[in-house]
Image: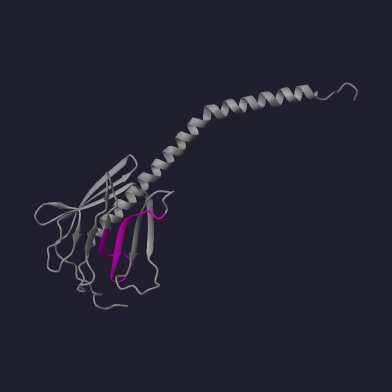
Amino acid sequence: MSGQRGFTLLEVLVALTLFALLMALAYAALGPAGEGFRMLAEQRGEVGATQLAARQLRQDVAMLAVSNDAAVLPLEIRSDRRGDRVFDTLTLTTFELGQPGVSQVRWALDESDIAAGAMLVRTSSSPWQRSGESEVVWQLGKASSFDVELLDADGRWRDEWSYVAHQPLPKALRITLRRGELRQQWEMPIELQPLADPYAGQQP
């Protein structure tokens, strides 16, 4: 029909320019909000990982076992302090749900990926594991410090411990975990009576 006409090139360019300007203004306004949501999600993830680590640590300590096999230590701490940062290693012999006999559980910070930062890792395996058998590995989020202390029979907190046969077990375990600005500390009582290991000596 002769009365109809399309948009001119100038009108199209003006419309595109206005659209681009509106998009730039919207991004400038919503960008900080999106960054805030991302940071909030990361913080929630760190809190969730910290709560999971706390529950599992309490369970491992509550099920601490003293084996009849003298080569299997029920509890050991290796201290590694670097200024205000701590990279301790905690090794426990414990009963795990769903696992036959006892397991040897190791808590430590894994620094194998320096660029990504240290990762809190829990590894679990049989104390009599054959070479080539795999460990169960849990990664429990990034952490900047993992500090382990034990309350000995004399009422002193110690940052190193290696079990000696017939020596009384510590009274409590204190763990301080730092994830950036987030700092959590837990004290966990240790049962003094040894748990009998029905699988002691039955090495697979």
Relative to residue 46, is residue 168 depicted above or below? below
> How is the model colour-coded?
one colour
Question: What is the quadrant of residue 88 in the picture?
Answer: bottom left
Bounds of the magenta segment: 90-112
Between 197 and 139, the one lying in front of the other is: 139
Between 196 and 27, the one lying in front of the other is: 27
Relative to residue 199, is residue 85 depicted above or below? above
Q: What residue is at 29 percent from the left and 70 percent from the top?
A: 127
Relative to residue 11, is residue 154 depicted above or below? below
**Main secondary structure found in the magenta portion:** strand
User: Whole-percent x and y of residue 186?
Assistant: 23, 48
Between 42 and 157, the one lying in front of the other is: 157
Q: Quadrant of the C terminus?
A: bottom left
Q: What residue is at 39 percent from the left and 41 percent from the top?
A: 43
For the image, the number of numbered tags is 0
Between 5 and 22, the one lying in front of the other is: 22
Residue 107 painted magenta: yes
Left or right: 137, with 202 as reference point: right
User: Whole-percent x and y of residue 149?
Assistant: 20, 52
Q: Quadrant of the N terminus?
A: top right
Identity of the residue furthest to the left in this view: 154
Residue 198 painted magenta: no
Q: What residue is at 14 percent from the left and 64 percent from the top?
A: 193
Question: What is the quadrant of residue 79 in the picture?
Answer: bottom left
Left or right: 16, with 45 as reference point: right
